[in-house]
Amino acid sequence: MRYLWQISAFIGLGLLITSTVLVAISTVILQTSKQEAAELIGFDMDLGFDGFFVGPESNFFQCRELQSNFTNQAELHAIQFQGFPNTSPYSEGVVAQIALRHCDYPVGKRSYFSCDDVPRGCQQILYSWSPGTDPLVMPSVVGVPFGPKGYNNLLLRIHYINPSEVTYIDNSRITVSLTPELRPYTAGYLLLGPSSKLILDHSKTNIPPGQNNFTIGGDCPPQTISSIIDGIPGKSSFKVITSTPVGHGILTNLTSILKRNGQTYELSSNGTFVYGQTSTIPLNVNVYSGDEIVTECTFNSTSRTKTTPGGYDNQSELCFNYLLYYPAANAIRCEGNLPITLLASAS
């Protein structure tokens, strides 16, 4: 049995007046016999920026496409995700976020590339690291699917906030621990919030300047949750194990509230959102047929003099919450084709 992860990148490195073009090809190969595979516990897949030159820019996003080849149609389960920012004394605090994303299809980039806007088809976040984020360790019965039948077109997106405009070589990364010993349950991701079409349509999502309490929201109604659970054979519920809220600099609160028989359960981090400090959050909440989840985002635009549109670049805003749950159903979002409550009440 053979597992192959191959990363190829052409890296442009500029230093002062001179520049050197490096070609870096790193390959991790694990090859075992069938007998050895039965004894195999797992291996780590290292996904990172290898020698990327951080130039004198104060605020920017950089991406790297990671293309995988899993031979013999191998199925794998990811059982742990962990972020490792660059540890150079020159770079402390510069890396604000490292996000591992799944793309619906290859992006077609062969090198590092600027990505203020997330490439089309790469909206799915698998794991997000910010300062203070703990490793995500999956429950012992659950794995995230990788390989031909799982996630295999990957994108690493790093946000650098560099007010001192220091220059250094960055090796920040995310490590994914994989095992060929498939666990009983497969995890899935569910996107909550207002309709993504609404959020990303600049003509429909505009946050006026000078507002300290501008709120939008979206509903995941009981009939949709019941339909999701009906798609999980033999189950009457699913369990949420993490929440990953997504927004930018003027998002101050993001709440996803589960409502059940007059009771409420928090599916976010007590609402408060601070970009660069809020990433993947551990949870342990069961969701049953008939439950409802309401997601609301509050923005403070008093620092802005122009309207803030919806979008992925750091001058735009988002209102998404990705839930990691199991057992997985076919549903990937509970925000599209739903009645969206636009609270949009400035005060």
Image (cartoon, rainbow, N blue to C red):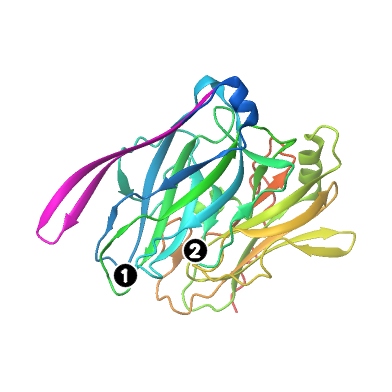
Task: Specify the farthest residue to the left.
Answer: 17
**Mark 2, residue position:** 206
| Disc 1 crowd, CA 10 A, few/some/many (<14, 14-19, 20+) | few
Residue of label 1: 90
SS for dot 2: strand
Mark whose residue sits in front, 2 or 1: 1
> In this picture, is 24 found above or below 267?
above
Under mark 1, the amino acid is Tyr
Q: Is residue 135 above or below residue 23?
A: below
- Magenta segment, prevailing SS (helix, strand or loop): strand
Q: Quadrant of the C terminus?
A: bottom right
Nearer-the-camera pick, 131 or 311: 131
Tell me if I can see residue 157 in this picture: yes
Give coordinates of residue 292: x percent, y percent.
79, 54
Question: Residue 213: image x %, image y %?
Answer: 59, 76
Answer left or right for 128 relative to 267. left
- Other-residue count near label 2 (Cα within 10 Å), few / some / many at <14 / 14–19 / ≥20: some
Residue 124 in view of the camera:
no
Q: Is residue 234 left or right of residue 165?
A: right
Name the side, left or right, on which 49 lies relative to 260.
left
Q: SS for tag 1? A: loop
Q: Which mark is residue 245?
A: none
Relative depth, front residue between 232 and 88: 88
- Residue 240: x %, y % from top left: 73, 51
> Which residue ends up furthest to the right in the rendered image?
261
Q: Amino acid at mark 2?
A: Asn
> Which region shows up in magenta?
1-29
Q: Nearer the viewer, residue 345 or 124?
A: 124
Q: Residue at x 56, y 63 (%)?
A: 133
